[in-house]
Image (tube, helix red, strand yellow):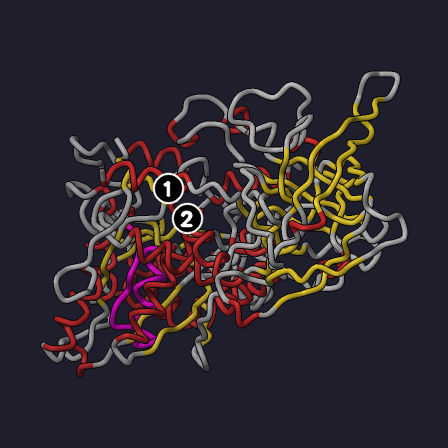
Amino acid sequence: MTEIIEEGVANEGGLNFVEQEIANDLAAGKNGGRLNTRFPPEPNGYLHIGHAKAFIMDFGAAEKFGGTCNLRFDDTNPQKEDMEYVNAIMRDIHWLGYDWGDRLYYASDYFPQLYDLAVRMIKEGKAYVDEQTSEQIAEQKGTPTTPGRPSPFRDRPVEENLDLFERMNKGEFEEGSMVLRAKIDMANSNMHFRDPIMYRIIKTPHWRTGTQWKVYPMYDFAHGQSDYFEGVTHSICTLEFVPHRPLYEYFVKELADESYCPRQIEFNRLNLTYTVMSKRKLLQLVKEGLVNGWDDPRMPTLCGLRRRGYTPEAIKDFVNRIGYTKYEALNHIELLEHAVREDLNKTATRVCAVVNPVKLILTNYPEDKEEIIEMDNNPENLEEGKHPMPFTRELWIEREDFMENPPKKFFRLSPDKEVRLKGAYIIKCTGVKKNDAGEIEEIYAEYDPDTKSGMPGSDRKVKGTLHWVSVPHAKDAEVRDYDRLFAVENPSAEEGDFRDLLNPESLKVRRNVKLEPWAAEQTKPEGHFQFTRLGYYTVDPDSTEEMPVFNKTIGLKDTWAKEQKKAAK
């Protein structure tokens, strides 16, 4: 069972266990005291926040210990790869603040060396061509508790294996008809040692090498060798590769010696509540139109989180909080949201927007009067200054901020009750106007001219404060309110079709939003705002001068902080 965990813990020296292993190797002078990590994504999809945890470790460890980090695309399957994914991956890594310098590589760079190594292993009797079907190979491998059976082709003569492997690469055989397998041990307790497949036939042209190759190496054969060719000292990966490590070492030692040998270290993946991290499932959501592309703000992809308004600083802070461990965990999405709020609270500009407007008319305010209210851009950092906001007789307020028959502890506007309009005056409700359907069209109130915020005599206290926007100056805007993509905490653990677990309320589009005019002028791409009393929002790429579009990043209510305070009592 996957444990729900809150935060990882570093050791006394401030290093997590991976960093401690690296520090020990450097202190022992392994590989000449050199550190070279790598991040090896497959270019068959977009990076998600789980990948971010991985490359934050890869690039971060290199920075911490004065080493280098390579970016290497594991492009060994041309059937699923695309340049679109390559560009997106590089863009996302740069967005989080990391760079690989001149160390950009591709596994396809090493196809000649890998092929030559395979030929050498055939000549040494360490590999053979197998003509069994994939089902037959799987069946004769046995089970974890019963040994496998040798392939009928296991003892083929070396010359025949060499000839068949060469002809496989010339395209003489159909896909799936033959594979090259390593000859290791069919009775080994580690299933990965039972004559693993090294090469398979793929006739799809490769996006970098064209039709030069018809055979392509499997991950377990290509990965360690690519690390070796690049001079990688520490191959840091996730826990599912623990059983692969002996095979990684087996293949690497076909090349390495005592002077230099890559080392594999594993840590736990990033799993998040109300989210799936399976690239296959994410691709399904995109292909079937269940989300609006890889950068849909409900997706856990980095481009989706970026479009939603999550910041690199918040993502890195979250990864640092959960830490790196040797056991799988399910992390609370509330902690990620807490990290986002903490960062945006320091940086987001405060503005007013009314998402469900109803008109408020101050009956004793002069019709031709207009004044400018100076609003703080960010009360957390007063050095960011103020911006002007026009105040007039007619204002938009939130429909939810008024009730004719309110319950107790309703501290917003109701008949004969007083509230303060943020930055302006105290008002008192005097009546309403309804349409034929009984819906409120207008709310009437009187303002107290002696209660203007910041002026002498303005210290009279009322329990409620409302945000507002001037009717004649308001700008129309669209707001996309996003919620969690899945309706259950751990969709990966549920039986049945994961698509049935999608949250039908994960997106609500509001097109009658009223925005203060200054905010409408500040809508640069990915600009961050706090809509007063509503939450944090960011400017969407769909935004235009005529119609600003905002994505809801996160609400103001911090569930995580509240629970932590409760637990501390």
Residue 38 left/right relative to 9: right
Vertical comparison of 208 with 307: above or below:
below
Q: Which amino acid does label 1 sit on?
A: Trp
Q: Mark 2 points at which residue?
A: 338
Vertical comparison of 44 with 251: above or below:
above
Counting from the top left corner in percent of width and height, residue 248 is at 25, 58
Q: In which quarter of the image is the N terminus?
A: top left
Tell me if residue 234 is in the magenta stretch. Answer: yes
Counting from the top left corner in percent of width and height, residue 397 is at 72, 39
Q: What element carries label 1?
A: helix
Task: Please state the extent of the stretch shown in magenta in the rendering.
Answer: 220-238
Counting from the top left corner in percent of width and height, residue 48 is at 48, 51
Query: Across the whole image, how many numbered discs are drawn on residues?
Result: 2
Q: In which quarter of the image is residue 399?
A: top right
Q: What residue type is labelled 2?
A: His
Q: Mark 1 points at which residue?
A: 560
Q: Can residue 497 be seen in this view?
A: yes
Q: Can residue 216 be seen in this view?
A: no
